[in-house]
């Protein structure tokens, strides 16, 4: 029987491209997201299963996992659910921070809570999509960046504890990918890549051994380098390159 991958946030963008890529790899694919019509339309058109889910509901995440595992335990789960809403400082508000944290961070937490007890027994791979934007603070993206930084830290912490278990946790940090999420952006996005390219980097990375899968290579390496700059160099540089 072929392996099963569950892609959460699989109805558009990177998740939808991943669904197609894994079907081509011979996997059975199950996709989840909130919008049922969009989800089932895609599932029917590419030939995979679908299960509606809102990751901001802890109960729904636990129920979805129990439901899926009644049939068969996925070999792999990829968490691609996420959202972004720009927040310039003049519009700073807690609602934005809370709603992004709910989807981007607590969505991952709730899924971990559901999946980890099973995978600690059966084994399995979990790929979590965070973002290069979680490396360091970037203007206009304080709520998004903080939610992604939280995911990176969460995964790093768990990775150490999971080292000697059969749970293979991976952190995926993309740069700019052309999806409905970034189509809203009004600025020039450097090193923008297609969702298909992102999906192929992720599929390749999850077959490899690295904890972190980051791309595109040069852009990711540059941001990784910026991580080590002292504030007195980092702030003026970031101000210059993000100037509007
Ligand atoms: N595009 C980029 O440049 C980029 C760069 C770095 C990281 N990322 C990250 O990559 C992931 C995928 O982003 P994308 O660009 O592919 O965005 P996208 O096209 O907007 O896809 C987001 C997916 O998540 C689902 N989703 C949103 N809120 C959800 C919720 N509460 N519960 C369940 N599913 C939910 C969406 O469907 P519904 O709305 O129907 O629920 C959709 O399927 C996100 O975590 C994003 O932060 C993207």
Image (tube, rainbow, N blue to C red):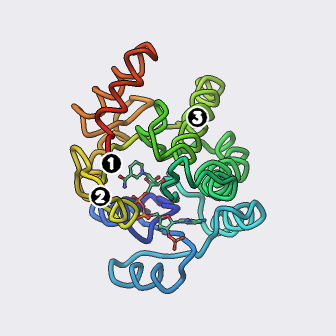
Kindly identify the residue that appears in the image at 69 percent across and 54 percent down: 98
Residue 38 position in % (x across, y down): 45, 82
Q: Which residue is labeled 1 in the image?
A: 203
Is residue 225 rendered to the left or right of residue 95?
Answer: left
Q: Residue furthest right?
A: 59
The correct choice, above or below, for 229 with respect to 204 in the image is above
Q: Secondary structure at mark 3?
A: helix
Q: Which residue is labeled 2 in the image?
A: 25
Which mark lies nearer to you, 2 or 1?
A: 1
Give the Cα separation between the discs numbered 3 and 2. Answer: 26 Å
Residue 27 position in % (x across, y down): 38, 61
Whether residues under marks 1 and 3 lie with C-beta atoms below 8 angstroms apart, the answer is no
Q: Residues within 10 Å of mark 3 (few under 14, many from 20)?
A: many
Q: Which residue is labeled 3 in the image?
A: 155
Q: Secondary structure at mark 2?
A: loop
Disc 1 C-beta below 8 A from ligand 1: no
């Amino acid at each position: 029987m072929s392996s099963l991958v569950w892609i959460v946030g699989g109805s558009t963008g990177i998740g939808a491209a991943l669904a197609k890529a894994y079907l081509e790899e011979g996997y059975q694919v199950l996709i989840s997201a909130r919008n049922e019509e969009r989800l089932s339309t895609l599932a029917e058109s590419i030939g995979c299963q679908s299960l509606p889910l809102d990751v901001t509901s802890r109960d729904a995440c636990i129920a979805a996992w129990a439901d899926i595992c009644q049939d068969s335990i996925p070999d792999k789960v990829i968490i691609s659910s996420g959202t972004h809403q720009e927040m310039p400082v003049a519009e700073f508000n807690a609602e934005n921070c809370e709603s992004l944290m709910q989807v981007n961070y607590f969505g991952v937490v709730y899924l971990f809570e559901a999946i980890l007890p099973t995978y600690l027994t059966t084994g399995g791979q979990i790929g979590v999509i965070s973002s290069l934007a979680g490396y360091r603070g970037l203007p206009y993206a304080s709520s998004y960046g903080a939610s992604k930084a939280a995911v990176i830290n969460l995964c790093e912490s768990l990775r150490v504890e999971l080292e000697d278990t059969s749970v293979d946790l991976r952190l995926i940090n993309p740069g700019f990918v052309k999806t409905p999420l970034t189509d809203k952006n009004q600025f020039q996005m450097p090193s923008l890549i297609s969702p298909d390219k992102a999906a192929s980097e992720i599929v390749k990375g999850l077959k490899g051994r690295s904890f972190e899968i980051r791309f595109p290579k040069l852009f990711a390496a540059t941001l990784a380098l910026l991580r080590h700059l002292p504030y007195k160099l980092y702030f003026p540089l970031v101000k210059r390159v993000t100037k509007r």
